Image (tube, helix red, strand yellow):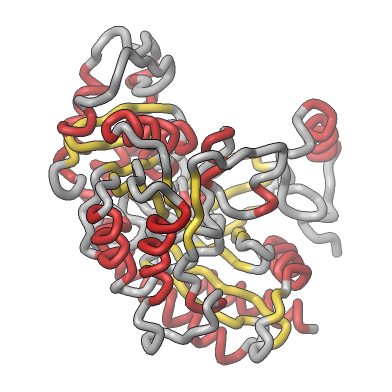
Amino acid sequence: MTTPAQEKTSRSAEAVRKHREFLWPAVTNFYEHPLVADRASMQYVWDVEGHRYLDFFGGILTISVGHCNPKVTSRVQEQVGRLQHLSTLYPNEEIVGLAEKLAQITPGKLSKTFFTSSGTEANEAAIMLARMATGRYDVVTLRHAYSGGSHLAKSLTAQAAWRRGGVISVGVEHAINPYCYRCPLGLRYPDCNVACANDVRNLIETATNGAPAAFIAEPIQGVGGFITPPPEYFKIVFRAVKEYGGVFISDEVQTGFGRTGKKWFGIEQWEVVPDIITCAKGIANGAPMGATIATAELADKFQGLTISTFGGNPVSCAAARATIDVIEEENLLENCASSGAHFRAGLDELQKKHALIGDVRGMGLMLGLELVRDRKTKEPAPQETNRLLERARENGLLIGKGGLYGNCVRLSPPLNISKADVDEALRLLDKSFTEVKA
């Protein structure tokens, strides 16, 4: 009997061949035999051979309300037929309607938005605005962070594999991150008194001129392996940043739009109100969209003119507004919390059964597993992680990976996933872990 990966058609093989011939080799694919996707619907993806997969990675936390959700695609189709593009030189009802909605759902006094096409651009705009508004240059961020693919975003990033190519981090300093499972200080929470948070203050005092323009961090580090800070962390950091006059930027590219459950934005889980929020991915259920949302006071300090040719594209704005409407109408902030708690409980049980699982972490439907060869030494298990992805794919489940060592499993199904689908994913994970061990 052939498996999905082995059952290659000429159509699939030709797509893989052309990908290797015409795309940059740096554009990596999962799996020994890459999956060539053909179509998708809600929680499922089909490859060109017709095999169906339960998708628990969601286009890297982008599919918020299900693949090709008819409530979203119908609005997109309607918009394409009416107005597809003009650029930001001309206001339209879609861009102003979405900006108004974002002002309503963001915390605090965040009220003005600059639209882009990606999270990378959103982070670039946030740093640029912070530097203009403060007249300062230094930026503090965290180790294990990932901020995007541009030169500046790579300098903010703190993982070797994503920083190669002559990146120069002038004016960017990286503080210790709240990686409790692998505490770089060798401490244990809560006895540590969250010493990692105090490192931000120390870094400002020693590695900058004492007057930072901004601090930027992901509430939960995505590519870093869903590293989740303790409850006190961001309050301590926020106080330090504000004491030294910096702008606090929350990078919500992965955590935004309900992904962590109950709240619209991840930073709200830590009861902190940022000066700027950046977002992308889940905002538009797969349509290219990024946004930098700031207070009016900060936004008004942008110097000179700017434009984003595709930022605020009417079609992407329609997709984003429809996605937000679905999240509200179907009460998906609550479903994310409920299904996420159910999922977390199941993952905790899998940890008891499979010694390969060293840590379970995350929040809502942004849950991660760190795989280790030995729980005492915490030796990373990247090869086993790759095998798990392969086995899960063969069993009909799509999952992601990440982490500095490539040993973290990333699980992020749509926010409207059912507990029955969660149970099926847990069954397939259990089966896949058993096969990896065998």
Q: Quadrant of residue 271?
A: bottom left
Looking at the image, residue 385 lies above or below residue 128: below
Q: Residue at x 30, y 73 (%)?
A: 231
Q: Is residue 350 left or right of residue 432?
A: left
User: Relative to the observer, which residue lies in front, 69 or 164?
Assistant: 164
Q: Is residue 55 visible?
A: no
The quadrant of the image that shows the N terminus is bottom right
User: Relative to the observer, which residue lies in front, 273 or 166?
Assistant: 166
Q: Is residue 330 left or right of residue 74?
A: left
Q: Is residue 427 visible?
A: yes
User: Relative to the observer, which residue lies in front, 312 or 390?
Assistant: 312
Looking at the image, residue 434 lies above or below residue 3: below
Q: What is the tally of numbered marks visible in this picture?
A: 0
User: Relative to the observer, which residue lies in front, 52 or 371?
Assistant: 371
Q: Is residue 340 left or right of residue 429?
A: left
Q: Residue at x 45, y 47 (%)?
A: 63
Give the x, y percent position of residue 236. Answer: 28, 67
Looking at the image, residue 276 lies above or below residue 299: below
Looking at the image, residue 369 lies above or below residue 52: below
Q: Residue at x 24, y 14 (%)?
A: 92
Q: Residue at x 38, y 89 (%)?
A: 191
The quadrant of the image that shows the C terminus is bottom right
Give the x, y percent position of residue 239. Answer: 24, 61
Give the x, y percent position of residue 163. Answer: 65, 45
Give the x, y percent position of residue 87. Answer: 37, 12
